[in-house]
Image: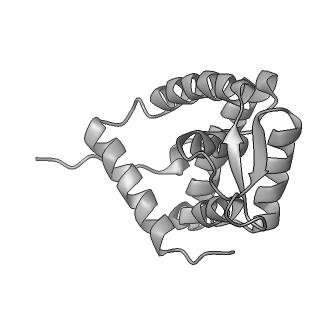
Amino acid sequence: MTRPAPLSRQAVTPGLDLDGLDQVLGIHVGTINTLLLSRLERQLESFKVTPKQVAILWLVNANPGVKQSDLSRFFKIERPTVHQFVRQLTMNGHLVSEPSKLDRRAGGLWITETGTATLTAAREIIFTDEAELLSPLTADERSELYRLIIKVYLSAPNRT
């Protein structure tokens, strides 16, 4: 059985010397990230939310009363960064923040009706866009891609 030729970004620009850049994981991850985000940003623009804000809405919807510190740990980003996302979502009427009844220093987040409607539309966009982008992969390849990405994510140190 013959093995398929290895995939390379060299095929995109055959005359460009990559000088080993094709072996740098970050360039591939960064390019895919840019591709995913730029497509989603355009499609989510009318809802006035970013992909990261949709992910926050998604988690708040599934976890009413979630704390910003939990979101910070999940995304592996600093709490002030999460605060800025939450502040914008709150100003746009997608989220409400209320102090905890048990600990006034801690607050929780809840999604509003507007946030729920935005999340519903955004999920449809995301699922459709990802299905199109991942269509060259088999179901097993998609599962392996997710498994490997999550493995790397779980091994990375928290930045919070």
Determine the residue positioned at 41% across, 65% down.
151
When asked about the image quadrant of residue 96, the answer is: top right
User: Is residue 17 placed above or below 10 in the rendered structure?
Assistant: below
Can see residue 6?
A: no
Determine the residue positioned at 10% across, 47% down.
1
User: Is residue 156 placed above or below 85 in the rendered structure?
Assistant: below
Q: Is residue 121 left or right of residue 139?
A: right
User: Is residue 126 placed above or below 160 in the rendered structure?
Assistant: above
Determine the residue positioned at 57% across, 30% down.
126
Q: Is residue 133 left or right of residue 112?
A: left
Q: Position of residue 155 (x, y in %)?
A: 47, 74
Q: Nearer the viewer, residue 34 or 7?
A: 34
Q: Nearer the viewer, residue 52 or 33?
A: 52
Can see residue 37?
A: yes
Numbered marks: total:
0
Q: Quadrant of the C terminus?
A: bottom right
